[in-house]
C-alpha cells in the first residue's frame, strides 16, 4: 500500500482516522502492518501491500 493512501482512507465503520503500526515497508510503501481506527479501535491488517478494510461481522 502506498503511504499517501493513509491521507485519504478512513475506517469503513465509523469514518475515523487510522493509526499505522508498520511491520515491514520502505519510504514509499507499506508491505505488512496494521491499521487501527483511532475512534472505534477496530484493527485492519495490511498483508503483501494490500489493506483489508472489510469489517468483521459483529457477533
Image: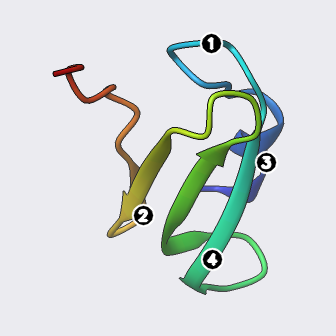
Which badge, 1 or 3, is on the more N-terminal residue?
Answer: 3
Give how far apart the Cα atoms at labels 2 and 4 are: 11 Å
Task: Identify the mark at residue 14; answer none if there is no mark.
Answer: 1
Measured along the vertical axis of the image, is residue 22 above or below residue 47? below
Residue corresponding to mark 4: 22
Q: State which mark lies toward you, 4 or 1.
A: 1
Number of labels in the image equals 4
Sooner in the amino-acid sequence: mark 2 or mark 4: 4
Considering depth in this image, is 52 or 58 the residue closer to the camera?
58
Q: Quadrant of residue 56?
A: top left
**According to the image, label 2 marks what residue?**
49
* Residue 45 located left or right of residue 29: left
Query: SS for tag 4?
Result: strand
Label 3 sits on residue: 4
In the image, taking residue 34 as reference, residue 36 lies left or right, namely: right
Q: CA distance from mark 4 to mark 3?
A: 14 Å
Work out whether 14 lies above or below 48: above
Q: In the depicted view, which residue is nearer to us: 22 or 39?
A: 39
Q: Nearer the viewer, mark 2 or mark 1?
A: 1
Amino acid at each position: 500500500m502506498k503511504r499517501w493512501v493513509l491521507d485519504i482512507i478512513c475506517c469503513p465503520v465509523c469514518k475515523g482516522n487510522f493509526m499505522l503500526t508498520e511491520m515491514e515497508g520502505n519510504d514509499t510503501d507499506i508491505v505488512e502492518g496494521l491499521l487501527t481506527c483511532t475512534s472505534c479501535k477496530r484493527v485492519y491488517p495490511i498483508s503483501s501491500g494490500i489493506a483489508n478494510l472489510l469489517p468483521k461481522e459483529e457477533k
